[in-house]
Structures are given as C-alpha cells and as structure tokens.
Image (cartoon, rainbow, N blue to C red):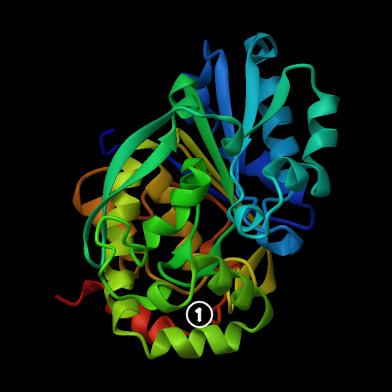
Amino acid sequence: MTSDNCKKVSLAKGAERYKNVQRALGLIKPDLEKIRGKKNILIKPNLTATKNAFANTNVEAVRATIDFLLENFKELHDSRFTILEGSGSAYYEKVTTREVFENFGYAELAKEYENVRLECVEDFLDFADIQIMSVAGPETIRVVKRFFDFDFRISIAIPKVHNYAIATFGIKNMAGVIRQDDKSLLHGLRTPSAPNAKTIFTYIPTSVIAWMRRRSPGLVNFIFKKSITYLKAVKVIHRNVVNLAKCVWPDLVVLDGFYCMDGNGPVDGFPVKLGAAICSTDPLKADGVGARLMGLRPEEIGYLYYLRKEGLGDYSLDGLVGDPIEEASRRFRLHPTYAIQKHWKDE
C-alpha cells in the first residue's frame, strides 16, 4: 500500500441511490482497471444492526456496484462475488448474520446472480491474529482467514457518527471481518490479557452494555461520560483501527450517502438524507470526502490522521470529480460523547 495522489475520488448527488452509486463508479472508471482479471471478489457491506435499516448498507448500493462492474468489465461474469459480513449486533442479540442477510434483502440479491454468494464470519473456524492495544496493554484480535482468499476487496459502507471513533466510513467498516466475540476488543475496554484491570465492563458485561445501548442510549452515554477508562479507550481505538486496516485494506470504497446517520451512531442514531454517493480506490480519499459531508475535517478523526501520516493514502481533495462537496454536505449532530472522543490526540 502506497500513497497515490493521482487517484480520483468521486461525489455524485441525485434523487436515486442506485443511479448515484453507478454514476460515482463511472466517474472513477479508469482507476478500476485493476479489477480486470480478478476472479475472487469480496464485497464487505456494513450490516451492524439487526433492526435499524438506516444503520446498514442498503442492498441497492450493493446491487448497483455489482451491476456496474458486470456491465463495464465483461470478464467479471466468470468471477465470483462474495458478500462477507459478521454483524456485531447479531452476535450480542444472539441471532446470526445470516438472519440479518435475510431480513435486509441480501438473500434475495444472491438469488438474482449466479456468481454472487453470501458468507458469514461465524461460519469460519480459521483466524489470523492481529495485535492491538487495550486500556490495560497489548491484546490480540482474530480476523477470519477467509478474507485473504480474495484478490479484490470492496467496502460498501455508510457515513455515520460513532460512539468511540467519532465517525465511521469505508475503512473502519472492514472491522466486520473480525471474529464475532473479538469485535469489542477493538474499542480497548475489554482486557482479557489483564483480567485485574478495571473498566466499565468489569462491572457491566459487554452484552449488557450492548442491550442497554439499544434501549436507553442516554443512560449508557451518561455512564461512559463519567468513565476515565472510556477516555483512554477513545485514544487506543484509533491506533487499533490503523493496525487492523493495514491487514484488511480495501481496494475500493463505495460510500452510500443517500442516507447517513448522526446522533447515537453507529446503530441507534438518526437518518440524515444527503442523496449522495462517494467512490475511490484510495480508501482515505473516499473516507475524507465522507467526513467533509458530515461537517468534519478528516484530520479530526484519529485513524484517518494516522493512516495519512503513515503514507497509506491521501485525504486531500486532489482528484475530486463529480459534484461539489458544498452541494451535498451539512453539519451533523455528533455523538453525545463527542466532547470526550475529540481528546483522542491528547498525550
């Protein structure tokens, strides 16, 4: 992975989600030439919620992406598209990712195409270790080894505010390939290697916090605002996302901003209609435009700042094609804990 300032990033605004995604992809078509000859293509949607459709990647954005690629790169008719996901909310609510696929139209999508299949992280037993940090010290998360079988990887996500990392886009969406019971480790507050370390989850189990967050987000936010370990967690998560991203980097990011999310994201926030789509083969460029649509600067988000500093991409507006940002952007209501989250950069 090297920085490539010549890559384009597109912004398409319009009245239809499907057409927006297709137009955004068309605007960067020259950068998609590297998909030619690829036989095993990953599509990673964001299906973090079991009920809130506005928190999940709409199936029409995935359909638009597949159709564009098949129409413009005919050899891909002989390739396989695999939609792989591990829904975090499904794990905590004791349902399966396959049920989420069923409930949000993905099972029907797979029936429409001979070369599209669905796979769930919980169906696999082999994982690769990635080192991260918790508030108490080093930890290890496990990423499904199936991810490394693909020769082209597409992240199709939604611009949303986040309860730890300020905002989430295409890069952080790749956290879905983490083993289900390791997902919360990315946030730093689970400390299995240091069982005597005291965090919120010492007193309230992760599953209970997840349950409470769905039913009383105000109470959970109040608890977290009073937590010293939460302040530590909002610092380590950005470094953890960087360590993860280096291993599961997407080749293409598609951000469906037809509806985004503000407030209590990434699951329980409010839909914000922007009617836009963003595409780039430089994930930092795509996420950088996504941040700007929310009224944020990319450098305000720790993991984007660190990835840019390490030369893994470019979130400048060099190479922007399509519609002007000011025609699609608006200032989002950030997460209620943002006043704490913004201290990620403090030493």
**Place of residue 114 in the rendered image (x, y in percent of width and height, measured from the top left):** 79, 17
- At x 55%, y 29%, the residue is 124
Q: Is residue 5 above or below residue 341?
A: above
Q: Is residue 91 above or below residue 201?
A: above
Q: Is residue 37 above or below residue 35?
A: above
Residue 186 is left or right of residue 1, and the answer is right
Mark 1 sits on what residue? Answer: 334
Q: Residue furthest front?
A: 196
**Place of residue 327 in the rendered image (x, y in percent of width and height, measured from the top left):** 60, 67
**Place of residue 143 in the rendered image (x, y in percent of width and height, measured from the top left):** 42, 37
Q: Nearer the viewer, residue 7 or 281?
A: 281
- At x 54%, y 35%, the residue is 154
- At x 60%, y 76%, the residue is 213
Count up the numbered dots.
1
In the picture, the quarter occupied by the C terminus is bottom left
Q: Nearer the viewer, residue 50 or 202?
A: 202
